[in-house]
């Protein structure tokens, strides 16, 4: 039996010793460094071997230009990255500078974990004005975009040529796009699907809403569209589900974690333009091309540039100035652009973009973003808290739809219920 | 298993070539029935083994395939383009850290965990099982209670403690618990094992003038070999496979163990090198497999003798 007095004594002892231990933290170091006595800032990012190599080069360059600052670089994979950040945020130990993802910006920004970068010196003159709001929440700048992505439809020209289908020119309505998907499925006798069900992709829906001048989320974090909008969207491909025009959900599941497009099972795929390298690697295709998404209004494609990643600093950093200089260097320096090319996305700062030479695949992506420049509108604000959950349930429910487990009406009801519960919970 | 003739059984009569009609022989039929049963049993067992081992087979086969042929629409087990390229990539390391370094880190952590657990858990278990001291049952109860506490509940408080002590990014947070008998499961395992050892053994030692240290080192430890070995195996494997602990406490890639390194090959936001990841998984599996093969016979041996060899 645990006796109450014993228990209390133990707890008291434990707390006391923890407090004593906590008191012997490190002494506060100096705020600025010098060449002989540099300050060290921690920088962390997610990514693979390739990004690690490039980042190391960029850090070495920064250190040679700024001898008073040392940068200690660390990296993990994407999933582990956020588990680690969550623990560190709770423990007050976030690294000084971090690579960041848009979907986590509001969450950490609202909880005052991130430094307001408006209070430090970072040059944003070379940035497109439509892009910066995506790093801001209620007037405070928490993140500076390093680079951009835009949504696109990928296709494999070799596959279309073998079927005798003309390559799309990028100006198409949804009806034409559907007809195109059906044609691929029919002409290949089911050997090749047209594409994945694009109505299951949240961002395609978001773009369609923008094409119809509807905001996905209102400023106070509520849903900006109605259940009827969602039903209309999911009905777009109702006639195509279960035909060779669209990859069946069974097949998608079998192929995971690879995409149907990367597995050479479909001829097109709609997603962000920075997937190019991954698709080329997975499919082994010689060449892939990008065209804009369909739109029923040929002057409004609903497209926008989204920061593929941002640079943020911890609110608790002891070296605000050093952190700001490092962020400024990473987003603006042309030589950094030369190191990363488009592996982070297309450089967001014009100085960096102009200072970088793009070849091959990189050029394709940069050219695509240039070609849609005239259609670009303001990037949406950072997504609402819990957006990741909403996107996942959107995907799950529309895959049930594709499986034929639910009707469009049932699916819309189910998603709205989940979304409204989540928004209520987080507000 | 084939049928075995025992000395009491008469030898089955060989059917002579000239004897046209088979003679009714109940013995030979039952032997045939036994054989049929045994064949069915073996086919079933082999099928089940195949099903269970298929993922491992898939992994080994895939480690020799080019990246574009792994998963996705490729269903064949073997590839025409057989190569060792994945192993070459895997051994190249990640971001300037060699794969050998990841292996060394994993080994240091795993061996540290085994040594720490064996030392601390056996001593604590001896105290709980053999020494009567005030508060023993309370402490024992509290120790068992920590078994019920999910790891995830203590992550953040623990992190704060180590962070304030400046011990993040060292192996100390990962190993200190092992040296302080914080793995209640192993302490419990050893206590139960010790309680089954005859008390007469240490009573006899005490009459001969042995103290606790002598009894523990000369009598208990040798008898506990099976428990020590199963503890070693489990703590080695757990430490070798641990992902969350190193993820939270280590920052410098040079200090990463294998499970963290493995994840760096697959990045859904960029290109994923499944081939290299699988090749490295195969390599990472080997030490655990060897460790188990070397020590598993001791478990069986230990369990069957139950420490009564004395």
Image: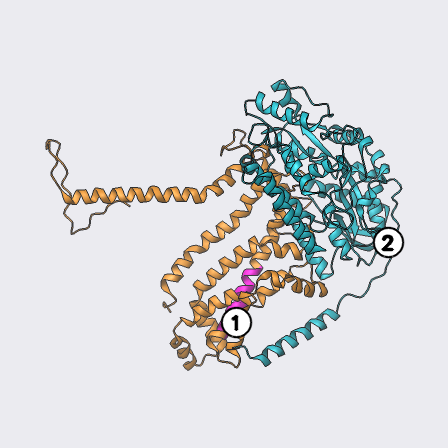
Q: How is the image coloured?
A: by chain
Drawing shade for chain B? orange
- Spot occupied by residue B56 in the image (x, y as percentages of width and height): 49, 43
> What residue lies at 88% left-to-right and 55% top-to-bottom?
A34
Q: Do the dots labelled 1 and 2 sit on one chain?
A: no
Q: Secondary structure at mark 1?
A: helix
- Spot occupied by residue A51 in the image (x, y as percentages of width and height): 72, 41
Work out whether A8 lies above or below A178. below
User: Label 2, on which residue?
Assistant: A321
The chain whose colour is cyan is A
Tag 2 subunit: A
Total tally of numbered discs in the picture: 2
Q: Residue furthest top?
A: A164
- Report if residue B265 is visible in the image: no
User: Position of A152 compared to A5: left or right?
Assistant: right
Tag 1 subunit: B
Q: Is residue B116 magenta?
A: yes
User: Position of A50 compared to A142: left or right?
Assistant: left
Q: Secondary structure at mark 2?
A: helix
User: Which disc number belongs to residue B124?
Assistant: 1
> Residue A109 sits in which quadrant?
bottom right
Q: Magenta region: which residues?
A: B112-127
Predominant secondary structure, magenta span: helix
- Spot occupied by residue A261 in the image (x, y as percentages of width and height): 62, 31
Q: Badges 1 and 2: C-beta atoms under 8 Å apart?
A: no
Q: Is residue A367 magenta?
A: no
User: Position of B27 compared to B49: left or right?
Assistant: left
Q: What is the crowding at mark 1: few (fewer than 14 residues within 10 Å), some, or many (at least 20)?
A: some
> What residue lies at 64% left-to-right and 36% top-to-bottom?
A234
């Amino acid at each position: 039996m645990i006796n109450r007095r014993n228990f209390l004594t133990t707890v008291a002892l434990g707390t006391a010793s923890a407090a004593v231990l906590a008191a012997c933290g490190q002494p506060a170091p100096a705020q600025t460094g010098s060449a002989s006595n540099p300050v060290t800032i921690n920088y962390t990012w997610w990514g693979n071997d390739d990004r690690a190599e490039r980042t190391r080069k960029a850090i070495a360059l920064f250190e040679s230009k700024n001898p008073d600052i040392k940068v200690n670089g660390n990296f993990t994979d994407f999933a582990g990255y956020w588990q680690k950040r969550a623990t560190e945020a709770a423990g007050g130990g976030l690294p000084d500078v971090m690579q960041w993802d848009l979907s986590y910006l509001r969450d950490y920004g609202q909880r005052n974990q991130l430094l307001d970068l408006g209070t430090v010196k970072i040059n944003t003159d070379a940035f497109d004005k439509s892009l910066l709001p995506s790093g801001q929440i209620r007037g405070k700048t928490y993140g500076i975009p390093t680079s951009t992505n835009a949504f696109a439809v990928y296709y494999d020209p070799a596959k279309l040529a073998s079927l005798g289908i003309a390559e799309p020119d990028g100006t198409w309505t949804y009806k034409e796009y559907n007809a195109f998907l059906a044609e691929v499925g029919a002409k290949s006798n089911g050997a090749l699907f047209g594409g994945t069900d694009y109505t299951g992709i949240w961002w395609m829906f978001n773009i369609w809403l923008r094409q119809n001048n509807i905001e996905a989320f209102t400023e106070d974090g509520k849903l900006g569209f109605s259940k009827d909008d969602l039903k209309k969207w999911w009905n777009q491909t109702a006639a195509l589900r279960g035909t060779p025009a669209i990859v069946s959900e069974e097949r998608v599941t079998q192929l995971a974690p690879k995409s149907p497009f990367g597995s050479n099972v479909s001829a097109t795929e709609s997603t962000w333009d920075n997937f190019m390298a991954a698709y080329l690697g997975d499919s082994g295709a010689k060449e892939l091309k990008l065209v804009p998404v369909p739109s029923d209004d040929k002057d409004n494609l609903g497209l926008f540039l989204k920061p593929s990643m941002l640079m943020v600093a911890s609110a608790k950093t002891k070296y605000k100035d050093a952190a700001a200089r490092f962020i400024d260097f990473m987003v603006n320096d042309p030589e950094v652009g030369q190191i990363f090319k488009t592996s982070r996305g297309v450089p967001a700062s014009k100085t960096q973009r102009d200072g970088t030479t793009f070849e091959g695949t990189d050029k394709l992506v940069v050219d695509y973003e240039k070609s849609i420049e005239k259609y670009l509108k303001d990037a949406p604000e950072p997504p609402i808290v819990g957006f990741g959950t909403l996107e996942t349930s959107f995907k799950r429910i529309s895959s049930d739809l594709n499986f034929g487990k639910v009707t469009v009406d049932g699916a819309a009801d189910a998603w709205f219920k989940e979304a409204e519960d989540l928004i209520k919970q987080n507000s | 298993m084939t049928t075995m003739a025992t000395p009491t059984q008469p030898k089955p009569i060989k059917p002579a070539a000239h004897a046209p009609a088979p003679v009714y022989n109940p013995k030979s039929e039952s032997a045939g029935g036994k054989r049929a049963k045994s064949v069915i049993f073996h086919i079933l067992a082999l099928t089940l083994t195949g099903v269970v081992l298929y993922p491992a087979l898939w992994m080994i086969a895939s480690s020799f395939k080019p990246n574009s042929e792994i998963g996705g629409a490729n269903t064949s087990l073997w590839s025409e383009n057989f190569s060792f390229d994945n192993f070459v990539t895997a051994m190249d390391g990640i971001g300037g850290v060699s794969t050998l370094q990841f292996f060394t880190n994993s080994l240091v952590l795993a061996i540290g965990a085994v040594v720490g657990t064996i030392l601390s858990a056996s001593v604590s278990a001896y105290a709980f099982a053999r020494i009567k001291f005030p508060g023993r049952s309370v402490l024992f109860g509290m120790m068992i209670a920590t078994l019920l506490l999910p790891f995830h509940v203590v992550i953040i408080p623990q992190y704060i403690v180590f962070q304030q002590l400046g011990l993040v990014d060292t192996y100390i947070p990962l190993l200190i618990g092992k040296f302080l008998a914080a793995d209640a499961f192993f302490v419990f395992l050893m206590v139960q094992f010790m309680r089954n050892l005859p008390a007469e053994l240490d009573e006899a030692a005490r009459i001969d003038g042995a103290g606790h240290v002598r009894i523990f080192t000369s009598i208990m430890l040798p008898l506990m070999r099976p428990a020590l070995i199963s503890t070693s195996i489990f703590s080695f494997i757990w430490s070798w496979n641990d992902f969350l602990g190193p993820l939270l406490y280590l920052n410098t890639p040079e200090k990463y163990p294998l499970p963290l390194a493995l994840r760096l090959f697959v990045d859904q936001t960029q290109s994923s090198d499944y081939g290299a990841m699988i090749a490295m998984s195969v390599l990472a599996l080997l030490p655990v497999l060897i460790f188990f093969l070397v020590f598993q016979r001791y478990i069986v041996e230990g369990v069957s003798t139950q420490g009564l060899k004395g």
